Amino acid sequence: MNLRFGLRARMIIAYAGLIIVGFVLLALLAGRQITQGATEEYYNSLPTQASLVAQALTEPLEHYSEGELDQVTLEASVAAYAQQLGAHVTLVDADGRAFLDSEGMIPTDNMLIYPEVESALRGRVTYGIYPDEAGTNRLYTAAPILEDDQVYSIVRMSAPAAVPRDRLMQRWLALALGAAFLGVLALIASWWLAASQTRPLEQLRHSANSLANGDFSQRLPEDRSDEVGELAIAFNHMVDQVQAMVEEQRGFASNAAHELRTPLTAIRLRSEALRDGTVDVEMAKQYVVEIDDEAARLSNLVNDLMLISRLDVAQSEIAREQIDLSRLARALVNELKPRTAHQKILLNLKTPNELPPIAATQGHIRVVFYNLLDNALKYTPEGGEIYWRLWTEDNWLRSIIEDNGQGIAPEDLPHVFERFYRADKAHTRTIGGVGLGLALIRSIVLAYGGRITIDSPGLGQGTVADVWWPLVVEPEPAA
């Protein structure tokens, strides 16, 4: 559970971290744009406000110049505009002399020295940033007051050059709230995505634990087309393979116990008879021979089982030597001549005088081909024929042993390599054998990287054993 939670937590942190980092970068970029936009808007707003104030003061200034409006009232109006806009307002005449100030401090300098005032005198509204008398940067602008399209007065305004905090705070607050909302959505999306990715792993863990406890009914849904779906397919295939292996092992153990029990029973019965002294001398001699035969059979069975076991678990550790199979084949044919003559069976070997070497253990390669020939002799009737052909094909050595014996039924062919499987059980009992020969042969061939097939057209139509054995590939000389 801790591993699963840790994986999910790490995925959430990774997903959320990537999304949040992306949001932070976007927020910083957006914040920069917001600051720039707010600054430009602030700088552009002061000239606009100056123009509006100039329009608003056009009529009062006319009344003021005609004596219909006193200076106190005009000063109050200008001060009200200045307070409302948070700016410093100064009224300048067409000659550049200031005649009214919102703070009551009328400048004595000629105002035409300031570029925004000079521009306003020409009918244009501009702004500039430069320090005031105290050395603090301020934003300055000026707008003309027109009468009959002539500039007769100017409104000069100034405000702090820095953008007011309230303007920036409002926008940054909106950005922060949006980022926080998106961050929450990112966490929710990360949790959902991590859960959807780890849920199949949790199912896999549960199924694997159940499988470890012997429940082979566990399967994962294969309804996804991504890597998780491929993992589910692989897991289900593994379960099928494990189940088949376990069933094979159970059958193997049962059959092995049965096959071991048979000679042991025969040995025990005959040894009891000898111990009790209930048999005559001739029968006692016969029992000793039978005990020796059963012991040899038992020894061969145990040796075969041990060899299969070693081949299954230590294929890479098998010692190898280079073997001329053509020479070994001729030796086996000569060894079996008395038996073929007795059974009146023709054993015909067709092989080149020399074949490229194969890498194997001498004893293993002998077991393979001796057992194949032994099977052919067992199941070929008197007067039958066995043909053994050897040749090379690409990087393989091919061996085909073909007989015209009793053959194999189609329903038995898929099982011929199973341990202790006997196709014709009645006939097997008369000729001996426990059904380990082909299983042992297949284990040896596979251990050396080869392959083997057994085929038969049907009962009474013979059998073909086809073995592919990898040749020893000599390394190319260095250039």
Image: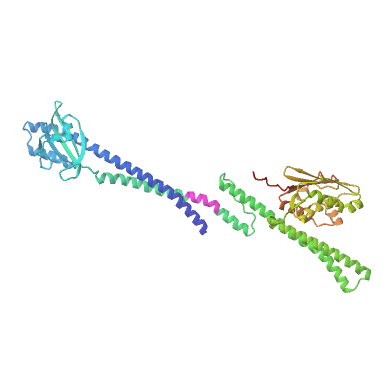
Q: Which residue is found at the position 91% from the left and 66% from the top?
A: 286
On the picture, is 397 further left or further right than 174? right
Residue 124 x/y as whole percent: 19, 30
Residue 425 x/y as whole percent: 83, 54
Say whether residue 279 is visible. Answer: yes
Out of 160 and 48, give the one closest to the viewer.
160
For the record, the magenta segment spans 192-201
Determine the residue located farthest toward the bottom in the rendered image.
276
Does the magenta segment cover residue 199?
A: yes
Determine the residue located farthest toward the front in the rendered image.
479
Q: Main secondary structure of the magenta part?
A: helix
Q: Quadrant of residue 123?
A: top left
Asked if 260 appears above or below 280 in the picture, the reply is above
Q: How many dots with numbers?
A: 0
Q: How is the image coloured?
A: rainbow
On the picture, is 220 further left or further right than 69? right
Residue 34 x/y as whole percent: 31, 42
Determine the residue located farthest toward the left in the rendered image.
67
Residue 427 x/y as whole percent: 85, 53
Determine the residue located farthest toward the top in the rendered image.
148
Say whether residue 221 is visible. Answer: no
**The C terminus lies in quadrant:** top right
On the picture, is 177 further left or further right than 299? left
Q: Quadrant of residue 245?
A: bottom right
Does the magenta segment cover residue 275?
A: no
